[in-house]
Amino acid sequence: MKTNILASLLMFTFCSIANAYPEFIAYGYTTCMTCHQNGSGNGPLNDYGRALWAGELSSRIVFPKKMTDEQVAATSGFFGSKELPYWIRPHIKYRGLNLRTNPGSGTQDTTKFYQMQAEAGLTTQADVDGKYAAVMTWANMSAPENYGKGDQGFKRMLTKELYLRIEVMQNTWLYAGLMDRVYGLRTADHTSYQRSWQGFNTRTNTQDGIIQSTGVIAHRVEDNWEVALNLFNGNPHDDLAYRQKGASLFSEFTVGEYKRLGASVMSERSDVLKKDMMAIHYRQQAGKGGALLFEYGIVKDTLTGADAKTGSYNLLEGFFPLIRGYNLKASVERYNKEFKASEPDYWKNSVGLFFFPLPRTEMRADLVNTRNFSNQTANEDGWSILGQIHASL
Amino acid sequence: MVGLFWGKFMLHFKILLLSFFVCSLSLAAETVSQTQSLPKSKIDFSYVSWSEVLKLEDGTTKDQATNQFFGNALTYQYDFSSRQASGFLVETGILFGKANAGGSQAGITYQTSNNPWSGALLAGAYRWNLSPSTYLSLVPTLLYRKVTMQAPNASTTQFKLAPDINQALIIEARALLTPKLSFKYQMGSLVTQANAWWGFGLGYAL
């Protein structure tokens, strides 16, 4: 049973946030720039992203058949079909997670509800084409002493994003301010080992620091490749000792029709942790609406005063369309904290529904199995059932 | 110790190799179109794992441990249905790998690792076409496996393995990456004295 608890802790104590959908290469969209204000993913959607969600990804169950996809897409603005001036785009997002761990195990069977994400903000742009834009988001960030208690509420609204975006030349953007660090595939799985062990947290004062950091990003997106360089200086909401300073590089290339191969590196330092990572990833469309994602990464952590530990992780995800708006998502993840025989391999398998029943709404229901392989011990599997809702205005 | 480290290194190497294999085959082949579908015969190579209950007894005390199996499966699958329709298929193949046993037993302590096992499976399945390139199958499976376990240190302690022949019910999702190559994911459970089964791998159309 200890393992079950450990597995649960591993899954959720290091819960990270990641709001992009590399799976949507399934629909032919290869770059985050298509849908997000931040071309590296995460954060508010642009007008095209909103329209795409409503007009292509979501179920049409609430719309009459005579209404075209274009007409549905036209209702995707913040106030529905009422068009706002080009220079202002508000956004509100909410994510809640209901987590049941060790179902059917008696006293170990627990259920908690997590307020994962509650945020509001706006994007303003100085010109119609959006060459000059500013993005601001305020989000609930639980205090370290409250994290994981399931009762965080909306008590601590802090600045999550505050940056300027300038298209300095054709296909090249410069970002400056507080924003997500650039690295690897940004999947929609908030509890993935992949994101957790990369150390991209939403909590303040963890050794890895918050995923958002002040800095600059230079991003070039061409038809068949993109590259983003990020220099960062830590998050001002973290105490000085936890602010991670460093650099990261993300690149991705088209290697076939709807097939992308990429790599990332990151090196960062704070007073408590020195972290170096590198990863390769691959994603491809598997028929219309289906996708396969793969990432393999190496993480080297050196805590101050301790020996360096180098481990690895991998993520393999299959995305299978059922009917419009409804998908089956299956993923296999593995993490090993150190390249040592005695260090367990943590495996996590999840399978579930990933669906968009309405425009602006995403829901998920997952069954998760965790299993650890070690030459030191063998323990019972851990099981969890997750239900998640995401609403985005 | 060196051997174990080497084993771990090889696991990572195999994962990398698998990824490059996917990439290279995907790149070499044409993209799946809406009209292509699953070929009738294919070979799958996959990584599989399941967990069994190992019963322990030392004369007066009864306890149980977890026996974790992990390894590879090489299987052949034949589809009876027409290419465009849902229908029945059969699968057979061999499996091999290692098993770790142990846990946090209250009464009897037993811990052993890297016990070799091998086996075979026979399955019938019904496949639904979700789209021209994605499929979902319900796979009742008959699994035979033989494992060589180390005996407990205490001469009085005995263990009782789950039966060598077990049944499993598995759900399999498959997506075509190219007309020849497919990715599969499995999750399910064994029936007798055992727990969850999962697997993932690649299929190659013959």
Image: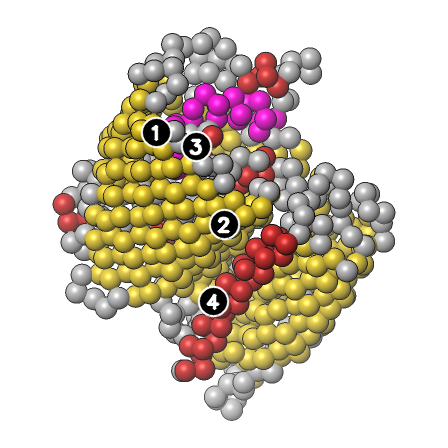
Labels 3 and 2 positioned on one and the same chain: yes
Q: Secondary structure at mark 2?
A: strand
Q: Quadrant of the N terminus of chain A?
A: bottom left
Q: CA distance from mark 3 to mark 2?
A: 17 Å
Above-or-below relation of B102 to B175: below
Identify which amino acid the numbered label 2 is placed on.
Answer: Leu
Q: Secondary structure at mark 3?
A: helix
Residue ID for mark 3: A33
Residue position marked by numbered label 2 in the rendering: A261
User: Tag 1 or tag 3, which sits nearer the N-term?
Assistant: 3
Measuring from the top left, give residue B19's x and y in whole percent.
Answer: 54, 59
Circles 1 and 2: CB atoms closer than 8 Å: no
Which of the two marks, 4 or 2, is nearer to us in this view? Answer: 2
Q: Give the Cα separation between the discs numbered 4 and 1.
A: 42 Å
Residue at the spot 49% in from the left edge and 36% down from the top edge: A223
Chain of residue at mark 4: B
